[in-house]
Amino acid sequence: MFRCFNLLLLLFCQVYHSGNTSKPVSGEKRGNVILPCQYEDRNIGHIDLFSEVEKIDVCETEECSGRVFKEGNCDVVIKNLIFSDAGKYTLRIYYNNDQTELKYQLHIHDEISVKTGEELKMSVLVSDADKVKTNSSGEWKEVWTRDHGVQSDRMNNDDGNLTIKSFLDSDAGTYRVLDTEGEILITVTVRESKETLEHTDDSKCDAVVSWIALTVVVLLLALILTAVTLHKRLLRGDLRCLSRSTEGP
């Protein structure tokens, strides 16, 4: 009897933990993501979707004006992702006078290119954010926490934006936003824009071309001036010879 009780308790714990394990789902900012239900029962009455703070309206088709809609049997699509969409979701499925719940952890990623010296503004300080880490120095370190704010005098928190005042190549790297449980909400890969270097090279090339053109013009002017001077001297010499010949004996 005791053994059967233990087996039932173990089975209950396994079911409980599996039902409370969040399925990781990843999407790109401005893209779409699917929260898959993979539920084949055709007698589904309806579904409800919840974030940690509110119930979310789910349209029946993509044709509606909202960003969240049902696809297929009970999959949910979130389109035009923004950073504030990141976090935990619960999908409640109602069927045959019963219900089940599926949980998700939505992670959003993005890539940014920044020119040296420009301001870098990342709208990553969402409501669930607890800390931000970066590996720009070669190892992961915190650059912002909810309790202590920014950890660098080159950064500031501007209305939910983590801002680097003047971007340096050493700021390039990966920035991760974590919630209170250490789950990754947002990943932003920041790269130094090559456009600055290309512009610099173009400027150098333009300067070299301009210098060569100026040198050629100066040389041409010098040659023309020299030719004119020689021509005048030769002309004067010819006139003198002519004058002497007319004054002969």
Image (cartoon, rainbow, N blue to C red):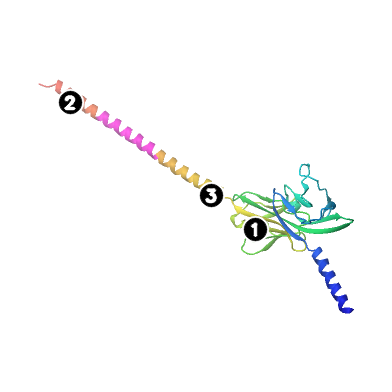
> x, y percentage for residue 167?
62, 52
Q: CA distance from mark 1 to mark 2?
A: 87 Å
Q: CA distance from mark 1 to mark 3?
A: 22 Å
Dot 2 crowding, Cα within 10 Å, few <14, some 14–19, many 20+: few
Residue at the spot x=83%, y=70% of the render?
Answer: 11
Front one among 241 and 126? 126
Quadrant for the C terminus in the image: top left
Q: Which comes before the other along the chain, label 1 or label 3?
A: 1
Question: Could you tell me the amino acid type at mark 2?
Answer: Cys
> x, y percentage for residue 110?
67, 52
Residue 241, numbered label = 2
Q: Residue furthest front?
A: 42
Judged by its main secondary structure, the magenta piece is helix
Front one among 205 and 111? 111
Residue 174, numbered label = 1
Question: Could you tell me the amino acid type at mark 3?
Answer: Leu
Residue at the spot x=27%, y=32% of the render?
Answer: 230
Q: Residue furthest bottom?
A: 2
For the residue labelled by badge 1, is the local secondary structure a helix, a strand or a loop?
strand
Front disc: 2 or 3: 3
For the residue labelled by badge 2, is the local secondary structure a helix, a strand or a loop?
helix
Q: Left or right of 229: which side holds 124?
A: right
Residue 197, numbered label = 3
> x, y percentage for residue 7?
84, 74
Identify whether 223 is placed above or below 24. above
**Magenta residue span:** 215-233
Q: Which comes before the other along the chain, label 2 or label 3?
A: 3
Identify whether 226 is placed above or below 72. above
Quadrant for the N terminus in the image: bottom right
> x, y percentage for residue 127?
78, 54
